Image (cartoon, rainbow, N blue to C red):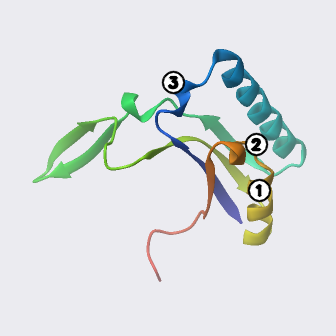
């Protein structure tokens, strides 16, 4: 089964940390990703730019509606993700608990599946 591990971090946190702290965290996340790859369970993953640089796209009456970030209704942003392939939800949760980001963010575990209930 495939799961997304979404790294939910406080939006302003990146601007408050030092460059050295940022590089230490980045290196730890790179090592974590490499360990997932070595175990043969990593399907993909990467860091994401802050949501201030993002845009939300929807449509109204057939016309695109764009909303530039940051998105004020949320206190957190998705700062990155890992896509893993494991045997169970319990294994995905255990792997999420190993993620270094749990020290400064929340790791949300979401199973990949259909967008309907049938």
Q: What is the distance, in whole Å, between disc 2 and disc 1 at their CAs?
A: 8 Å
Question: Which residue occupies the foreground of this view, 87 or 48?
Answer: 48
Which residue is label 3 attached to? Answer: 15
Whether residue 88 is visible, yes or no, is: no
Whether residue 39 is visible, yes or no, is: yes
- Give the residue at x 79% y 33%: 28
Camera-nearest label, 3 or 2: 3
Q: Position of residue 103 (x, y in %)?
A: 71, 44
Q: Position of residue 78 (x, y in %)?
A: 51, 44
Q: Earlier in the sequence, mark 3 or mark 2?
A: 3
Q: What is the distance, in whole Å, between disc 3 and disc 2 at their CAs?
A: 19 Å
Which residue is label 1 attached to? Answer: 97
Camera-nearest label, 3 or 1: 3
Question: Which residue occupies the foreground of this view, 74 or 87?
Answer: 74
Q: Position of residue 108 (x, y in %)?
A: 60, 57
Question: Which residue occupies the foreground of this view, 85 or 22?
Answer: 22
Q: Position of residue 51 (x, y in %)?
A: 42, 35
Residue 9, disc: none
- Give the residue at x 53% y 33%: 13
Dot 3 falls on a residue whose secondary structure is: helix
Residue 100, disc: 2
Label 1 crowding class (10 Å Cα cut-off): few <14, some 14-19, many 20+? Answer: some
Asked if the residue under mark 1 is in contact with the one under mark 2, i.e. CB atoms within 8 Å, the reply is: no
Dot 2 falls on a residue whose secondary structure is: helix
- Give the residue at x 47% y 83%: 118
User: In the rendered image of this protein, does residue 12 appear above or below residue 98?
Assistant: above
In the rendered structure, the answer to whether residue 2 lies left or right of residue 50 reads: right
């Amino acid at each position: 089964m495939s799961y997304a591990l979404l790294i939910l971090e406080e939006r302003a946190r990146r601007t408050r940390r030092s460059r050295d702290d940022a590089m230490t965290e980045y290196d730890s996340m790179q090592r974590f990703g490499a360990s997932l790859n070595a175990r043969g369970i990593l399907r993909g993953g990467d860091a994401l730019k802050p949501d201030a640089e993002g845009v939300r796209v929807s449509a109204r009456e057939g016309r695109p509606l764009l909303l530039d970030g940051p998105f004020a209704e949320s206190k957190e942003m998705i700062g990155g993700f890992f896509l893993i392939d494991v045997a169970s939800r319990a294994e995905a949760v255990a792997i999420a608990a190993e993620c270094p980001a749990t020290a400064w963010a929340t790791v949300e575990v979401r199973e990949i599946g259909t967008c309907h209930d049938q």
